[in-house]
Amino acid sequence: MSTEPGTGRAVEPTSEPITARAARPAPAATAGRDVPPLVTLTVWGVGPAAVAPAMLRMALDHRHLRHVRGLRFAKLLGTGDGRTFTVRDADPLHWALLAVWDDAPAASAFATGPTHRGWGRLARERLHLSLRPLASRGLWSRREPFGNPVPRRVDGPVAALTRARIRAGSTRAFWRAVPPVSQDLHTVPGLRLALGVGEAPLGLQGTFSVWEGTGPLVEFAHRRAAHVDVVRRTALEHWYAEELFARFEVLDAQGTFNGEHPLAPRAAA
């Protein structure tokens, strides 16, 4: 339990699986506003010889993305294992694109365009996730890319995305706090994929995770001591200049990450 800044009132820790405290929800009058019908996350895996071309591809795609019809919001992302959120975590063999769409036909048309064709020539594997926003709080680059969905629970797999811009004076505290949370995250039953993601090596930090269902996600967010402690410290110490949490229904998953499909059936222990 923490206190609300400036009031002294007790508040419950947020439930989001984030090493950033989620922003307060928007007023009820705006609930359901501007919610996109489709969000996609594509992760391309390349071989060591293709790392330099992949970095060039990231630079070129910034230009292509400015002119894509039906694309509301997009971020090209580097990836890592998210265990410390320092440069040691960086994974130069995996690169990602998060895209928010007006509709499915726009996303389908983009999938045959220069960005996907270019990555297709470089990549040795590809994971493509189709998502629908279930909840979103906070800002990314001063925008609400996923609108303000009315939070709801669904049966089946879900994904969580977190993103924060760390204040310059808070980086050391953040780095020290992350490893226990990351270590604990990877022990939670029901976690199927966890990535660190970011627009820059330092300062702009995020996570993306896929879960078998809402239950394991809630278990990690509400009941795991390491995560709850970081949420408490985030609220008290104001680590972030901007932050966002979003939860999604996983509509479809195609391809592999590190040779594995994240939602493939697992053999019983």
Image (spheres, grey):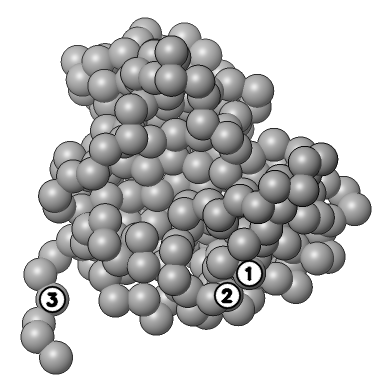
C-alpha gap between disc 3 and disc 1: 32 Å
Please tell me which residue is depicted at 45% across the width and 62% down the height of the picture.
221
- Asked if residue 224 lies left or right of residue 157, the reply is right
SS at mark 1 in the image: helix
Mark 3 → mark 2, Cα distance in angstroms: 27 Å
Circles 3 and 1, Cβ within 8 Å, touching? The answer is no
Percent x, y of residue 186: 42, 76
Residue identifier under label 3? 266
Looking at the rendered structure, the secondary structure element under dot 3 is: loop
| Number of residues whose C-alpha sits closer than 10 Å to that of mark 2, classed few (under 14), some (14–19) or many (20 or more) | many
Q: Under tag 2, what secondary structure?
A: helix
Q: Amino acid at mark 3?
A: Arg
| Image spot of residue 69 (x, y percent) | 37, 8
Question: Of residues 78 and 156, which is closer to you in this image?
Answer: 156
Q: Which residue is mark 2?
A: 226
Say which amino acid is labelled 1.
Answer: Asp
Crowding at label 3, few (<14), some or many (≥20) Cα neighbours within 10 Å? few
Measured along the vertical axis of the image, is residue 129 above or below residue 179?
above
The residue furthest bottom is 269
Examine the rendered structure and indicate whether residue 131 appears above or below residue 32. below
Let me know if residue 197 appears in the view.
no
Q: Is residue 86 left or right of residue 207?
A: right
User: Of label 3 and label 1, which has the lower sequence position?
Assistant: 1
Q: Nearer the viewer, mark 3 or mark 1?
A: 1
